[in-house]
Every structure is written in C-alpha cells, then in structure tokens.
Image: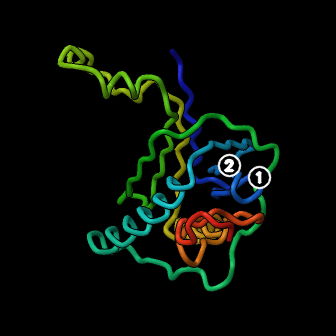
Amino acid sequence: MTHQVHAFEPPERFVAGTVGPPGERTFFLQARGGGRLVSVALEKVQVSLLAEKLEELLTEAHRRFGVDLPEPPAAVGDNDPLDTPVDEEFRVGTLGLAFDVDTATVVIEAIAAGETEAEVELGGPEDDEDDEEPDDDLDRLRVRLTPQATREFIERARRVVNAGRPPCPLCGQPLDPAGHLCPRHNGYHR
C-alpha cells in the first residue's frame, strides 16, 4: 500500500486551528507552502500536548546544544483563520518531535491513525518477523520549523485550545451557552 508524505521544509505557514462553534470544534494542523495546502485533523488534547512538548523540546535544545531561544512573542502573531478549503487529508494518530542539531530546526511529524495500530497493540511474538515499522505505510505530514516559528506555533496553539467554552467555576466542566447540569448543584441547571 502506498503512502504519502506531505513535507514542508520549511512551510510558508504552519498553524493549529479549528472549524465549528465552541463545543463542536474540529481541530486541525494546517501547513501551506509551494502552492500546496495540507490540513490534518486531530484532537484538542493532541494540540495542547504538542504545544507543551514543543516548549520542552526547545528548552532541552537550549540546555544540551546551546541553541538560542527566542522570547515568546509579545504581540499576538498569526491570528488569521485556517486557509480554505479545509479538506482533511487524514486524522492524526501519532505525533513525533525531533530537534535537528545540524540545521537548528524542530521537526514535527503527524502520522495518520491506521488499522495497523490496533494490530500492533494486539500482536504477539509472531510479529517480530516483520522488520518494517508499523507506521511506514501510513500517510504523514512533516514540517521543519525554526525556533522562532516554533514559538509562534506554540503561542497560537495555546490560544486556540483556550478559546473554547469557559469552564464552570464550581466543577470545571465546559459551560454550554444554554448552561449545563452541574454535579456540584446536584444536577440543577446552572
């Protein structure tokens, strides 16, 4: 089975964004460059963890390799909506991060969720015969960012994640515009 690698090294634009109203949002990573536009869907928690782990990766690159880290942007950077059309290439199952010391860039790889993931988890010792990586036949999006572009991505990703429904002050669950059944109020509408 053939797979596609959408490589942007570097992209003109790489952002996290959403489509839909709060509470029903679909999260995307979108890369644009060279006349191409690739959008991949993922979960809110994946966007949040990606921002957190990128921050840790930059800190570790500074500690180990002496990479100069840019300050977080003081002004709001790219706050534009996702480019259209937002056509989902695939749903992300795995995210990979690396720091390339030679070019002082961050490499982010989003790998499609596939049926092979369930087979690998359930597989036994007979799977050892196959030397091929389980993700080798899955589509992927690969971007290479400078530390400055990575900082800008982190800040936008955090804004996107935090732009959802506000939390209930009592229970912390998201508040819908029509309210919600708060467990702290024994199920009464709040």
- Badge count: 2
Q: Which mark is residue 79?
A: none
**Mark 2, residue position:** 26
Q: Residue 34: x, y in percent? A: 71, 45
Q: Is residue 153 visible?
A: no
At a point 53% along the width and 40% down the height, the residue shown is 92
Residue situated furthest left in the rendering: 125
Front in this rendered view, residue 177 or 180? 180
Q: Which of 161/23 is in front? A: 23
Q: Tell me the CA gap for discs 1 and 2.
A: 6 Å
Quarter holding residue 14: bottom right
Mark 2, residues whose alpha carbon is within 10 Å: few (<14), some, or many (≥20)? some
Q: Where in the figure is residue 50, as x and y percent of width and height?
A: 48, 58
Quadrant occupied by the C terminus:
bottom right
Q: Do the numbered discs 1 and 2 sit on residues whose CB atoms are within 8 Å?
A: yes
Task: Specify the quadrant of the image occupied by residue 165.
Answer: bottom right
Q: Earlier in the sequence, mark 1 or mark 2?
A: 1
Question: Would residue 188 be visible to someone looking at this image?
Answer: yes
Does residue 155 appear to the left or right of 134 in the view shown? right
Point 71% across, 69% down: residue: 78
Q: Which residue position holds label 1?
A: 20
Q: Amino acid at mark 2?
A: Thr
